[in-house]
C-alpha cells in the first residue's frame, strides 16, 4: 500500500464553509476528479509533516494547527491517504505549482462534494463532524 498524506484546509467566507482543493496537472487529467492537496511521504517523514509539505508545495499555503481526520483507501491504485484538517491561514491566496496541480482554489463544501474523488468525500464528512458549521 502506498502511503500519502494531505490536508483539508477550511475557511468561512460570507457565512459559507469553503475548503481548499486542487486539480491534477496534465492533459491526461483534464477530466480527473479534484483532490485535497496531498502526496507521498518521504522516507522517515511522519504523516503530518508530509501533509504540510505537500500542501505548501502544491498550493503555496502554509498550514497552521492540524488534526487527523483518519485515512481512506483507494483500492484501484493501492493508495492510503491520511487526512489532516485545520483552518486555513487568514488571507491566504492559494496558487498552483503547475507541476503537480493546474488549479488550487477554495470552493464551498457543497461544491467540493461533486468535484472531489469519491473516496475523498469521506474527508468532508469527517471535517463537518469536527467543527461547528453554524
Image (cartoon, rainbow, N blue to C red):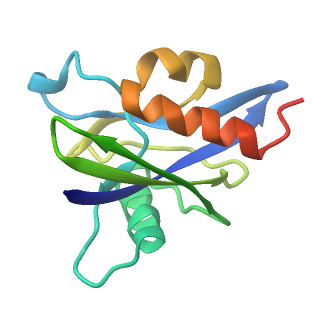
| Residue that extends furthest to the right in the rendered view of this protein | 134
Q: Is residue 108 left or right of residue 53?
A: right
Q: Is residue 82 left or right of residue 98?
A: right
Residue at the spot 48% in from the left edge and 69% down from the top edge: 48
Res. 104 visible in picture: no
Q: Nearer the viewer, residue 12 or 94?
A: 12
Residue 88 lies, in percent from the top left, at 66, 50
Res. 8 visible in picture: yes
Residue 130 lies, in percent from the top left, at 74, 46
Residue 86 higher or lower than 126, as above or below: below
| Residue that extends furthest to the left in the rendered view of this protein | 28
Residue 114 higher or lower than 25, as above or below: above
Residue at the spot 52% in from the left edge and 54% down from the top edge: 70
Residue 22, quarter of the rendered image: top left
Residue 31, quarter of the rendered image: top left
Residue 5 lies, in percent from the top left, at 38, 58
Residue 131, quarter of the rendered image: top right
Q: Is residue 79 left or right of residue 56?
A: left
Q: Is residue 103 left or right of residue 93?
A: left
Q: Quadrant of the C terminus?
A: top right
Residue 78 higher or lower than 55, as above or below: above
Residue at the spot 43% in from the left edge and 62% down from the top edge: 51
Residue at the spot 63% in from the left edge and 25% down from the top edge: 109
Residue 4 lies, in percent from the top left, at 31, 58
Q: Nearer the viewer, residue 109 or 15?
A: 109
Amino acid at each position: 500500500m502506498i502511503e500519502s498524506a494531505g490536508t483539508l484546509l477550511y475557511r468561512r467566507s460570507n457565512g459559507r464553509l469553503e475548503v481548499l482543493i486542487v486539480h491534477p496537472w496534465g492533459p491526461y487529467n483534464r477530466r480527473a476528479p479534484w483532490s485535497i492537496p496531498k502526496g507521498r511521504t518521504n522516507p522517515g517523514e511522519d504523516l503530518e509533516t508530509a501533509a504540510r509539505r505537500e500542501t505548501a508545495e502544491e498550493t503555496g499555503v502554509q498550514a497552521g494547527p492540524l488534526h487527523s481526520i483518519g485515512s481512506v483507501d483507494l483500492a484501484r491504485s493501492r493508495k492510503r491517504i491520511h487526512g489532516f484538517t485545520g483552518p486555513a491561514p487568514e488571507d491566504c491566496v492559494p496558487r498552483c505549482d503547475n507541476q503537480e496541480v493546474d488549479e488550487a482554489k477554495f470552493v464551498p463544501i457543497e461544491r467540493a462534494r461533486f468535484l472531489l474523488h469519491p473516496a475523498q468525500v469521506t474527508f468532508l464528512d469527517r471535517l463537518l463532524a469536527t467543527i461547528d458549521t453554524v
